[in-house]
Image (spheres, grey):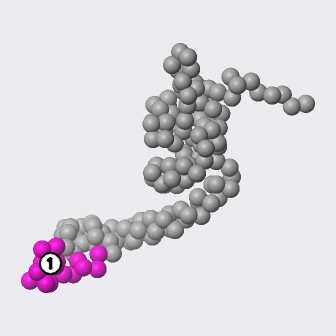
Amino acid sequence: MLVAMTPKKLEMSVGQLAQRAGIAPSAVRFYEEKGLIFSHRTSGNQRRFHRAMLRRVAFIRASQAAGIPLSVIADVLAELGDHESPPKSMWEKASKRWISDINNRIALLENMRDLIGSCVGCGCLSLGACHLLNPGDELNSLGPGPRRLMGGAS
């Protein structure tokens, strides 16, 4: 036998959402301010969040744990209505989009790990030649910016 949930059970306060999601109430308000989650106001001007916001917060936290910026997470969540929670298919679709970005960051970190041992102790920390400070800068052999603009190193 299915028991229908009353509207009050479908809604929770800032504190209840924070507790159930394992985050601070200030994080709930921050996510709402950024348009990632939504609430409505009661007659007593208190925020009430639909249960669907629990799943949104879980989606946000998992995305952030993967290093995804909030602006990118917001773009994905914008595809949903205000009271919709992200389905599993949305996470799969989003994670496929983010794989190349994550792989690029891994490659950058691995490169930094490999270079840091040779850089520390050399003492140069030259902005023009240090591959640790300027990873992938093909122009660093030409020297600082003004020399590049003047047609090469001098």
Return the residue found at the far right. 1
- Hey, which quadrant is residue 136 in on the image? bottom left
Q: In the rendered image, which quarter contains the C terminus?
A: bottom left
Residue indicated by mark 1: 149
Q: In the depicted view, which residue is nearer to us: 51 or 135? A: 51
Residue 54 placement, left or right of 23: right
At 51% from the left edge and 53% from the top edge, which residue is drawn?
Answer: 75
Q: In the rendered image, which quarter contains the N terminus?
A: top right
* Residue 80, image x, y percentages: 60, 47
* Residue 71, image x, y percentages: 45, 51
| Span colored in magenta | 137-154
* Residue 139, image x, y percentages: 24, 79
Residue 90 placement, left or right of 153: right
**3 inside magenta stretch:** no
The answer to whether residue 19 is seen in the rendering is no
At 54% from the left edge and 24% from the top edge, which residue is drawn?
Answer: 41
Q: In the depicted view, which residue is nearer to us: 130 or 26? A: 26
Q: Tell me the crowding category of disc 1: few under 14, some 14 to 19, or many 20 or more residues within 10 angstroms, Cα based.
A: few
Residue 38 placement, left or right of 104: right
The answer to whether residue 112 is seen in the rendering is yes
Helix, strand or loop at label 1? It is helix
Residue type at mark 1?
Leu
Looking at the image, is 33 positioned above or below residue 138? above
Looking at the image, is 4 positioned above or below residue 140? above
**143 inside magenta stretch:** yes
At 21% from the left edge and 81% from the top edge, which residue is drawn?
Answer: 141
